[in-house]
Amino acid sequence: FDSARGASGKRVTMASAVALLRRCRDAMGPLLTATGARVCDALERKGLHPLMMPLAEKQQGIILGLLQWPLFVPSATEKRSDENLMLVEMSRGSYLVKPCGTPWQFSRRLAVESDAHDAEKASEILALASDVCQQLEPGSPPYVAGAFRQSKLRLDQFLLLRVGPFHDAWEALAQQQLRNGQQTAALIAGERASARNPGWGCGAWLQSRLMEQLGRKEERRDLALAALEAPFWTLGAPLDEVQAAAELSHVSDVRALIREMELKARARQGLPPPTPQEMA
């Protein structure tokens, strides 16, 4: 954390990151407890991504935490949490990390899903989620019970339009459109999943799988290669599975190969080699 910089250009220290964790834990603790999660101590980091600070343990041992990562840059129209803190989920000992949006978006999503599924504690969860949103994003409009049903939208559509660009919602939308025979719409959804989650390989991997379902083998391979350019923990799938789709199962050091390919491409275009900062 000590050398990380946020999208605003401010240096983010470990102390400030921990302070933000405490703020989110204080705000979200009652809400997470109401949904059945156990609030974690910040020091319970064994088996987790080194940049992840645990917030709560959900069912099946899934850990919800805050990730400080400079590549997360919300668009101008999105609600923004402090600096570049976003919520993620992962299982201890796994290297796969799932993006869950900002704390504001995640809390609002819990309210929407509780209302949509007629959860036993829906009223309590809606009230707690509203409190969280007001603490983290003062002035933001609360989710109103019944808004989902009144919209006549599917849950994935509602989340994407009214809450945030959750990757799993984009994937659900793309797969539904593909089942409906709307191939172009499905591919557009895949592109947006990637564009709205910058720095994450799971978007390009979703596009690759969509191409596989459509029998477009070369595009499947190229998009799998694009996914491998992102950190492997952002793929949302086992590395060997993505390597196979990229036709690189025989390569032991995929990252070195991708860097070599990039250098050759830059040379063909007459561009200078990347700086050490870019290589990092």
Image: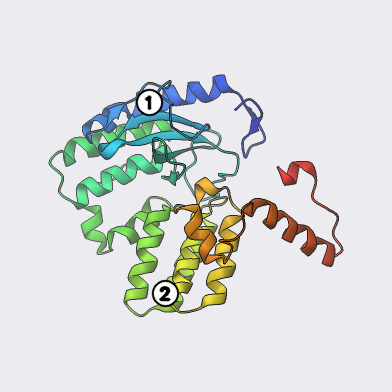
Mark 2 sits on what residue? Answer: 213
Residue 145 visible somewhere in the drawing: no
Mark 1, secondary structure of its residue: helix
* Nearest to the observer: residue 111 or residue 51: 51
* Nearest to the observer: residue 245 or residue 109: 245
**In this view, 260 is above or below 103:** below
Q: In the shown orientation, is residue 165 left or right of residue 61?
A: right
Quarter of the N terminus within the rendering = top right
Quarter of the C terminus within the rendering = top right
Mark 1 sits on what residue? Answer: 25
Q: Residues within 10 Å of mark 2 (few under 14, many from 20)?
A: few
Q: Amino acid at mark 1?
A: Arg
Q: Position of residue 134 (x, y in %)?
A: 37, 33
Q: In the shown orientation, is residue 258 left or right of residue 186?
A: right
Mark 2, secondary structure of its residue: helix
Q: Nearer the viewer, mark 1 or mark 2?
A: 2
**In this view, 231 is above or below 56:** below
Q: Position of residue 10 (x, y in %)?
A: 65, 31
Q: Position of residue 203 (x, y in %)?
A: 50, 58
Q: Earlier in the sequence, mark 1 or mark 2?
A: 1
Q: In the shown orientation, is residue 53 left or right of residue 195?
A: left
Q: Quadrant of residue 260?
A: bottom right
Q: Quadrant of residue 177?
A: bottom left
Q: Amino acid at mark 2?
A: Gln
Q: Residues within 10 Å of mark 1 (few under 14, many from 20)?
A: many
Residue in the picture at 78% in, 58% down? 263
Residue in the picture at 12% in, 41% down? 120
Instruction: Give the number of the disc on residue 253.
Output: none
Residue in the picture at 50% in, 56% down? 240
Report the coloring of the rendering.
Answer: rainbow
